[in-house]
Image (tube, rainbow, N blue to C red):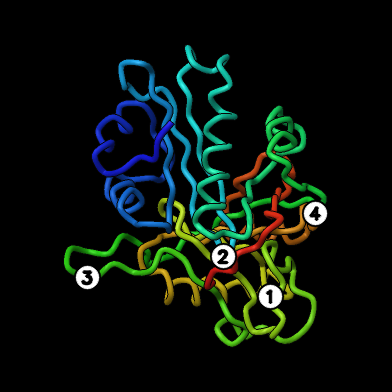
C-alpha cells in the first residue's frame, strides 16, 4: 500500500477510467499536495491492482472513487485502501472522513466497518451544467481546488436552506457551504437557498470561485419531488439512482484545519 504520485499516472490510466476525470485533472490531483490523496495497492511485482482517491472537503476527507481488479477483490483490497485513506486523513489533520452511502447497496457494509455515521437525511445529488464552464487554459493560473460559499455570495437570507451544510455548522452563520472540485464539477456540501428557483445564485457564485469546472453538484432532499421535477425541466441531471446519505466518521482527537 502506498500513496500515488505523478510517477504513477500512466499505470493509473491503464487500470481505471473515472467519469469526468481528464488526464489534465488527474495530473492536478496527483500533484496537489494535501488537497487530494490517491493510494494504491500493488502486487509483489509492484504492479498496481487497485486505487482509491479522495479529496479534502472542508475539514473532512471525502472518499470518492475506488477501483480494484477482479482478481484482487476477494483479498479485502477495497477495505485496505479505505483504511489507508482514513489514516492519511488523520495524519493530514482532517477532522474526519466522509463518503456518499447508498443504503440499498452492499457498500453499506463497508461504511459500517469504517464506522461512518449515516443517520442524516435521505438525499439526491443533482448536477447543473455551467454555460461557460471549462478547464483553465495554459498560463491562466491554477484556481483553488476547494473553498467555501458565503451567505453574501449566494444572497441567502437567514433561515432554513433546502439542505444545510452536511459537513459542519458554521457558528458565525456566514459560511453556508463547502465546495471541492471533483473532476469537472464543483461538489457542494449544502443547498443553501430556500427554493430551487434561487439556484442560479449558487451556480453564479460557484462559477466565480471555481473557474476550472463546467458543472455544479449539490444535494437536495430525496422527498422533495416538486423540486426534482423543476430541476428535470431545467435540464439538471440526477446523479444518484436511489436516495443516499452522507456518511461521516469524526476522529476522537480533533486537529482543526483551516477551511
Q: Which residue is mark 4?
A: 120
Q: Secondary structure at mark 2?
A: loop
Find the distance from the CA under tag 1 to the CA under tag 2.
Answer: 19 Å
Q: Quadrant of the C terminus?
A: bottom right
Residue nearest the viewer, comparing 155 with 9: 9
Is the C-beta separation of discs 1 and 2 under 8 Å?
no
Residue 45, position in %: x, y?
31, 16
Residue 252, position in %: x, y?
71, 55
Q: Would you place residue 120 above or below residue 49 in this image?
A: below
**In the image: residue 98, left or right of residue 138:** right
Find the distance from the CA under tag 2 to the CA under tag 4.
Answer: 18 Å
Crowd class of label 2 (few under 14; some 14 to 19; many from 20; radius 10 Å): many
Residue nearest the viewer, comparing 255 with 168: 255
> Which is in the foreground here, disc 1 or disc 4?
4
Q: Which residue is mark 1?
A: 193
Q: Earlier in the sequence, mark 2 or mark 4?
A: 2
Amino acid at each position: 500500500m502506498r500513496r500515488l504520485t505523478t510517477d504513477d499516472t500512466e499505470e493509473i490510466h491503464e487500470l481505471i477510467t473515472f467519469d469526468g476525470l481528464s488526464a489534465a485533472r488527474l495530473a492536478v490531483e496527483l500533484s496537489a499536495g494535501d488537497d487530494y490523496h490517491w493510494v494504491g495497492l500493488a502486487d509483489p511485482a509492484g504492479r498496481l491492482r487497485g486505487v482509491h482517491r479522495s479529496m479534502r472537503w472542508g475539514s473532512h476527507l471525502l472518499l470518492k472513487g475506488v477501483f480494484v481488479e477482479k482478481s484482487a477483490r476477494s483479498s479485502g483490497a477495497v477495505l485496505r485502501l479505505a483504511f489507508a485513506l482514513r489514516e492519511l486523513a488523520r495524519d493530514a489533520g482532517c477532522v474526519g472522513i466522509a463518503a456518499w452511502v447508498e443504503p440499498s447497496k452492499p457498500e453499506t457494509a463497508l461504511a459500517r466497518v469504517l464506522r461512518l455515521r449515516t443517520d442524516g437525511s435521505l438525499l439526491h445529488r443533482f448536477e447543473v451544467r455551467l454555460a461557460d464552464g471549462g478547464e483553465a487554459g495554459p498560463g491562466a493560473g491554477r484556481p483553488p481546488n476547494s473553498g467555501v460559499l458565503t451567505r453574501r455570495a449566494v444572497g441567502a437570507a437567514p433561515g432554513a436552506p433546502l439542505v444545510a451544510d452536511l459537513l459542519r455548522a458554521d457558528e458565525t452563520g456566514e459560511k453556508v457551504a463547502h465546495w471541492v472540485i471533483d473532476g469537472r464539477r464543483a461538489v457542494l456540501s449544502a443547498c443553501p437557498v430556500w427554493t430551487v428557483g434561487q439556484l442560479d445564485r449558487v451556480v453564479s457564485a460557484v462559477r466565480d470561485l471555481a473557474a476550472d469546472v463546467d458543472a455544479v453538484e449539490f444535494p437536495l432532499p430525496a422527498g422533495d419531488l416538486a423540486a426534482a421535477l423543476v430541476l428535470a425541466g431545467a435540464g439538471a441531471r440526477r446523479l444518484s439512482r436511489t436516495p443516499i446519505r452522507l456518511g461521516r466518521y469524526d476522529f476522537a482527537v480533533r486537529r482543526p484545519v483551516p477551511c
